[in-house]
Image (cartoon, rainbow, N blue to C red):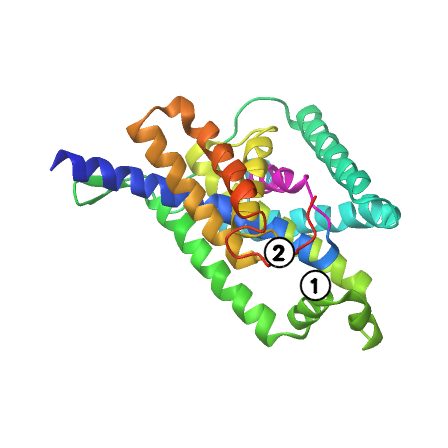
Amino acid sequence: MRGLDEFLQFLFSGLTRGSIYALVGIGFAIIYNASHVINFAQGEFVMIGGMAAVIATTKLGLPLVAAIPLALAFAALVGVALEKFAVEPARGASVVAIIIITIGASIFIRGAVEVAIGKRDHSLPAFSGEVPIAIGGATLQPQSLWVMGSLVAVVVFLKWFFESTRLGKAMLATSHNRLAAQLVGIEVRHILLASFALSAALGALAGILTAPITLTRYDIGVMLGLKGFCAAILGGLGSPYGAIAGGLALGLAEAMTGGYVSSGYQDAVAFAIILGVLFVRPQGLFGRAGTERV
């Protein structure tokens, strides 16, 4: 059953990739919902998460269990600074201008990390060893289980957060109608800061989870940010749960194309799918018709 072995191997690879894309895509969706800003610096939070965890373990000597929360908190702080000092001052500008600002912020963050840390690759140890798990003739790395399990945990957390906490409900209210949210006493500025912090932390989590698998470096966020954006578009830009579906679909499409066609077409097929979706269903798989897009 050689064919089944290969299929399972590609399936595991696709689910791992898709989970990472989904985590990044959720960040895009959360910020877009709260502020209608498409944050093209989202990929840099992936890099920041991995790099911060590496520095915390190698330079500060912290155990991984302490380094991860510290890296998430640092990324969230950078997200708040991005909103406060780059996005908020341009609140009255056009959507295109704000997008350019986030692209500029992305370049600045990437350049600052390159100067401070260098261009070489960095790695984190696998969370629970590197002995592969045999399943149906295929093998699955333990770190892949951490990636997929973390996505499930994030889904559960987001459901609880948006349905059971005041901050989460305030975020939902702001995403539906900012003016109405202001009229009932919600501090929209605080909500925007919180959305950037949450988005940054989710991106950083993706970077921490991938560092033991693919290593991390100053420019790793560029492609992962684009793939996360594709996941958000595929699922519907305003839908966090759509971003999850879009990310998983994108990861599986890449893995199957790379396995059965050619690895050289993996990136191309991702963007081809996005173009197809934009032509056939511009609002994405789970988006609402008539949603404002750029």
Q: Position of residue 145 (x, y in %)?
A: 35, 49
Q: Is residue 144 above or below residue 271?
A: below
Residue at the image point whose x is 44% and y is 42% from the top: 250
Name the amino acid, label 2.
Gly
Q: Is residue 128 left or right of residue 197?
A: left
The residue at which mark 2 appears reads as 238
Name the amino acid, label 1.
Ser
Q: Position of residue 242 (x, y in %)?
A: 51, 55
Q: Nearer the viewer, residue 265 or 160?
A: 265
Q: Is residue 109 visible?
A: yes
Secondary structure, magenta segment, majority class = helix
Q: Are marks 2 and 1 in contact (CB under 8 Å)?
A: yes
As measured in the structure, the alpha-carbon distance from the residue carrying label 2 to the one carrying label 1 is: 9 Å
SS at circle 2: loop
The residue at which mark 1 appears reads as 175
Q: Nearer the viewer, residue 223 or 165?
A: 223
Callout 2: few (<14), some (14-19), or many (20+) C-alpha neighbours within 10 Å? many
Q: Earlier in the sequence, mark 2 or mark 1?
A: 1
Query: What's the magenta region?
Result: 37-52
Q: Position of residue 42 (x, y in %)?
A: 64, 42
Q: Is residue 285 left or right of residue 178?
A: left
Q: Quadrant of residue 161?
A: bottom right
Residue at the image point whose x is 47% and y is 28% from the top: 268
Residue at the image point whose x is 64% and y is 49% from the top: 200
**Residue 48 forms part of the magenta stretch:** yes
